[in-house]
Image: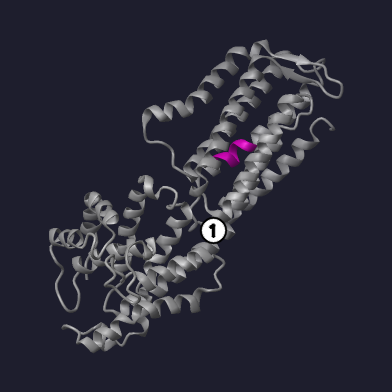
Amino acid sequence: MHYFKLQIGSLFVVLFITFNYIRQTSGKNRNLSCNKLFDALLIVSPWFIFFDGLTAWTVNHLDTVPLWLNNTFHCLFFLAVDVTMFLSFIYLCDATFGFPKSTIKRILLCSPFVINVLAIFIFIKDLDYVIGKTTNYSMGLSVIACYINAWVYFLFLFFVVTFYRKKIEKNRYAGVIISVVVSLTVMILQSIFPEILITSIVPAAFILGFYLFMEDPSYRRLEKHNYEMISGFSTLVENKDDNTGGHILRTKQYVEIILNQLQNEKKYRNIISRDFVNNMLNAAPMHDIGKISTPDVILQKPGKLTPEEYEIMKQHAPRGGEIIMETFSRLDNPEFLKTAYYVARYHHEKWNGNGYPEGLDGEKIPLCARIMAIADVFDAVSAKRCYRDAMPIDQCFQIIEKGRGTDFDPDLVDIFLSAKEEIIKVYSTKTFE
């Protein structure tokens, strides 16, 4: 028993998490989407730990376990190690910069795994069993290949979670980096002292870290409900403006297109983090939330507003910021609160300083509000309203282009116009009120 006590403990942790994860994502809870890569890790990791424990026992009973069976168990163990490391790497790639679309890059990332699998099968027959002071252990080219593969992917993992740290939400980054560091420490110790047999900690650390900080269904469900409530509240406000919520859906999609383009721009690469993207997309539906305090007679007036009515209408921007601070200040996400406040209050500011409510100009206007301004105006002119018909799509693009450097951030206008095909796709597939 003393040969595999650690493996039993690690297996218990992984199976407990697996059981809890299945319970919270099946049956009546199926409305919560699952990450297939994490699901695959939950399937492979127990086998990693099981064969680790099994081989820890067989190497200490070489007199009773046939050599071919011992080699077979070790082969399965090495394969489980490789698959676990590879899936963990792909999982973090998917959670940060996404798995590369380039065939060449995919081949390069997968090649260490493929080469090592071949090395395991080729050299497994030459496996050596060393008699240690406290326990026996295995050595040989298959073991060395497995170590090399693990180190390669650990270096990849460490590179991903440090270089692309802005792609991971702040509240999740600490857990991910701790999981990687703990696993890396275990591999260092295991490589230096092969007799200690603590490899099973690696999958347990990965599963525990990924589950608690990335995949916990309870946390994701609570987060989803919070933002559904916010989106529902925003839709009610839009209905007050004689709109069925289409404006909210479209502007959010236009914002997402701009954000996707910005992530490829060197100037914005260090600004557009995963937190920024998530906060912006969740805040976008609330940009007009201040209209809840605007009289219906003004919101739904079929003709042009009088100067006095327009002044009242303009108050929806500062009032929107106030409502957000009053209503959502208890949400445990200050960055989201700030983004939502900026979007609501400043999305009518203009690049030349002629906007409202404060007359901010240039980069004094928060980036999130500058993005929202373009999406809001484009949808406003391209959709039918109670006081006018929708404008032709070409004219809508011309209005955005004409506002370059006066109404809108010139860089953002260029980025928006460079994504015309995606914009038109959103425009064409939505029903306009």
Number of marks in the image? Answer: 1
**Percent coordinates x, y for residue 367 in the rendering:** 38, 60
Front residue of this view, candidates 281 and 12:
281
Q: Position of residue 254 (x, y in %)?
A: 30, 58
Q: What colour scheme was applied to this rendering of the protein? A: one colour
Q: Can you identify the residue that label 1 sits on?
A: 220
Q: Nearer the viewer, residue 89 or 188?
A: 188
> On the image, which quarter does residue 330 sit in?
bottom right
Is 26 positioned to the left or the right of 51 in the image? left
Q: Is 228 included in the stretch rendered in magenta?
A: no
Question: What secondary structure is the magenta-colored segment mainly?
Answer: helix
- For residue 144, which quarter of the picture? top right
**Residue range (magenta):** 40-45
Asked whether, in this view, residue 228 is left or right of residue 46, the answer is: left
Location of residue 212 with respect to 323 vertically, above or below: above
The furthest residue to the top? 126
